[in-house]
Structure formats: structure tokens, C-alpha cells
Image (cartoon, rainbow, N blue to C red):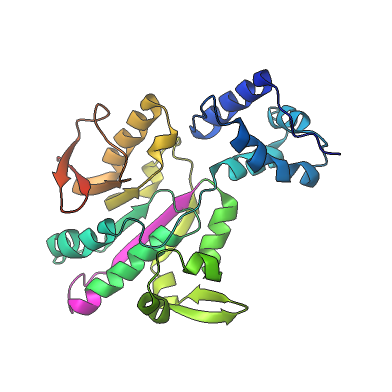
């Protein structure tokens, strides 16, 4: 019989491991989350207790297990066109400002999860181009990154079940941007899929090989990090943005006290941050 108990000391060790690996800070009251996320891995890795699983995870030689654990702890639910306003601001403010740029635009979805955000950006982009023929002539390249290889595989497959499709997606957009693939599943159409490239990235690592971006989406991610890690990530975003490039954070996230490299722009609705120089 599986033993899903975990002692406080073991939980504390695991919290330290997770923060070192990916920056996520678990509070004192998140033991239930660790149990629910890690319990499915016990059978897969042949251990009969959560204590044994955590102990093996702390070993640097257990690379496959460590990757699976980080994968399990960083997977979050998402939805299409989350909060609505970032995608509307792309079409009403940012793209009109950049529509005559004589190069392709680059947008980064910095925690792409199962793909809904970067594909929503691609859909909003196509809607803008349809309404404004000749704008953004050099095209828009969207890059989605995530720490979870499982999520990245889902992103690249671009196929979603009826439950995922029901979360934030209008009937009109489903008809326009998806094709049925049977068994209640639907796949993103090829023109939208081709706009997005996916790659593995840990936000604690360097972004220098990513190049420069015009817009970065990093929404509902910073809430999991310590203030020091938040400041480090935002500083790296500033380096990755072109002058006067835009950064979207989550609706409940703030840059207050973390950086002086951005100016806050209040929109109606929503807030965006623009790199000062």
C-alpha cells in the first residue's frame, strides 16, 4: 500500500530543492499540493512512499526523476485569451504602433504551459492582419517557452480536448482556428500553428540566446517566485526587449519595488509595462 505521508523536515528539504531548480517558492501550507502532484509518480518510479520519492529526488544522480518532479510541480491550468485585455491591447494599441516596422516582430510567451497563450497571440495577430490589410508586412514570430517538456510536447502537438476548448474560446474562434480531429479533439489550424515555435527554457537561466523581442508575455508566473528572483527575471526581460518594448504581467502581479527600467501604462482595462529606452 502506498504511503503518501511526508514529514515536515522532508517537506522543507523538498521546498529548498524546488526553489533551487526552478525558483518556485512553496509556502508552509502547500504540503497538500506536493502530495497531490507527486503521488502519481510513485508507481512510475517504483517507490511505495512519498518519503522515498522525495529522498530519491534529492539525489543529483536521479536526473529522470528530478525532471519528472519539476514537471509535475510546474504544470498549471490555463485557458484561451485569458483576461481578454492583453490580446485586445495587442490589436488596439501595440500593433498599430508597430504596423510599419520594417522587420518582423517577435513576441515571447515566457511560460507557455499547454499552448493556449501563444496560440491565442497568434489568433489575435491574424485577426488584426485580416482587419488591417498590408499591416505587419514582415510578419510576426511567436516563441513559446516552458520548463516542462510534457507541456511543450502538448504545445507542439496543438491538439486539445473538449474541456480545454471550452475554456475561454468562443464558438466563432473555434470554427475559424481549429479543425476537428475526432474523438472530441480539435487541432489548431496550420497557419496559426506555423506562427509559433516552442523551446525549453528555465526562467532562472540566461535568455541571451533568445534574441530581442518587441513584446513579452509573462503572466501569472512571478507570483510563484521570491522578490529576489522576480527582480532578476524582470531585469533579464528588460535586456531581452527592444527599446520601448512591452511586457505583460498577470492581472494580480505588480512590478512595484522590483525594477526602474519600465514605465507603467494604465489602459482601460489592464496595465502594461513599457521599457524606458
Tell me which corner region of the image, top left, top right, bottom left or bottom right, holds residue 208.
top left
Tell me which corner region of the image, top left, top right, bottom left or bottom right, holds residue 72.
top right
Q: What quarter of the picture does the C terminus occupy?
A: top left
Residue at the (33%, 45%) spot, across then down:
250
Q: Is residue 166 magenta?
A: no
Vertical side of 113 occupied by 157: above or below? below
Q: Residue furthest top?
A: 9
x then y, percent, for residue 132: 17, 76
Query: Is 16 positioned to the left or the right of 249 in the image?
Result: right
Residue at the (36%, 57%) spot, across then down:
82
Query: Is 31 positioned to the left or the right of 155 in the image?
Result: right
x then y, percent, for residue 269: 19, 53
Vertical side of 254 occupied by 220: above or below? below
Between 140 and 121, the one lying in front of the other is 121
x then y, percent, for residue 128: 23, 72
Between 147 and 120, the one lying in front of the other is 120
Residue at the (83%, 41%) spot, across then down:
46
Tell me which corner region of the image, top left, top right, bottom left or bottom right, holds residue 133.
bottom left
Q: Can residue 101 be seen at all in this image of the molecule?
A: no
Q: Is residue 145 magenta?
A: yes
Q: What quarter of the picture does the N terminus occupy?
A: top right
Residue at the (55%, 55%) spot, across then down:
151
Total numbered circles: 0
Vertical side of 250 occupied by 23: above or below? above
Query: Is 258 positioned to the left or the right of 269 in the image?
Result: right
Q: Can residue 57 be seen at all in this image of the molecule?
A: yes
Vertical side of 182 occupied by 49: above or below? above
What are the residue bounds of the magenta stretch? 129-146
Amino acid at each position: 500500500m502506498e504511503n503518501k505521508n511526508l514529514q515536515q523536515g522532508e517537506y522543507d528539504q523538498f521546498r529548498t530543492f524546488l526553489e533551487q531548480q526552478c525558483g518556485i517558492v512553496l509556502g508552509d501550507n502547500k504540503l497538500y499540493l506536493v502530495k497531490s502532484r507527486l503521488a502519481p509518480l510513485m508507481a512510475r518510479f517504483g517507490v511505495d512512499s512519498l518519503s522515498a520519492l522525495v529522498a530519491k529526488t534529492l539525489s543529483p544522480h536521479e536526473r529522470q526523476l528530478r525532471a519528472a518532479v519539476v514537471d509535475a510541480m510546474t504544470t498549471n491550468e490555463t485557458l484561451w485569451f485569458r483576461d481578454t485585455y492583453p490580446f485586445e491591447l495587442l490589436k488596439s494599441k501595440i500593433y498599430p504602433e508597430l504596423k510599419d516596422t520594417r522587420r518582423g516582430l517577435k513576441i515571447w510567451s515566457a511560460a507557455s504551459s499547454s499552448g493556449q497563450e501563444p496560440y491565442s497571440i497568434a489568433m489575435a495577430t491574424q485577426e488584426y492582419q485580416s482587419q488591417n490589410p498590408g499591416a505587419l508586412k514582415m510578419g510576426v514570430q511567436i516563441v513559446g517557452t516552458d520548463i516542462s517538456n510534457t507541456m511543450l510536447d502538448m504545445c507542439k502537438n496543438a491538439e486539445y480536448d473538449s474541456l480545454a476548448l471550452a475554456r475561454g474560446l468562443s464558438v466563432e474562434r473555434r470554427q475559424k482556428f481549429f479543425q476537428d480531429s475526432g474523438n472530441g479533439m480539435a487541432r489548431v489550424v496550420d497557419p496559426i500553428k506555423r506562427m509559433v515555435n516552442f523551446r525549453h527554457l528555465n526562467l532562472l537561466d540566461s535568455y541571451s540566446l533568445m534574441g530581442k523581442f518587441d513584446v513579452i508575455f509573462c503572466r501569472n508566473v512571478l507570483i510563484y517566485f521570491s522578490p529576489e528572483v522576480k527582480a532578476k527575471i524582470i531585469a533579464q526581460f528588460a535586456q531581452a526587449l527592444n527599446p520601448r518594448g512591452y511586457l505583460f504581467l498577470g492581472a494580480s502581479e505588480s512590478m512595484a519595488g522590483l525594477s526602474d527600467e519600465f514605465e507603467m501604462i494604465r489602459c482601460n482595462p489592464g496595465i502594461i509595462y513599457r521599457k524606458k529606452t
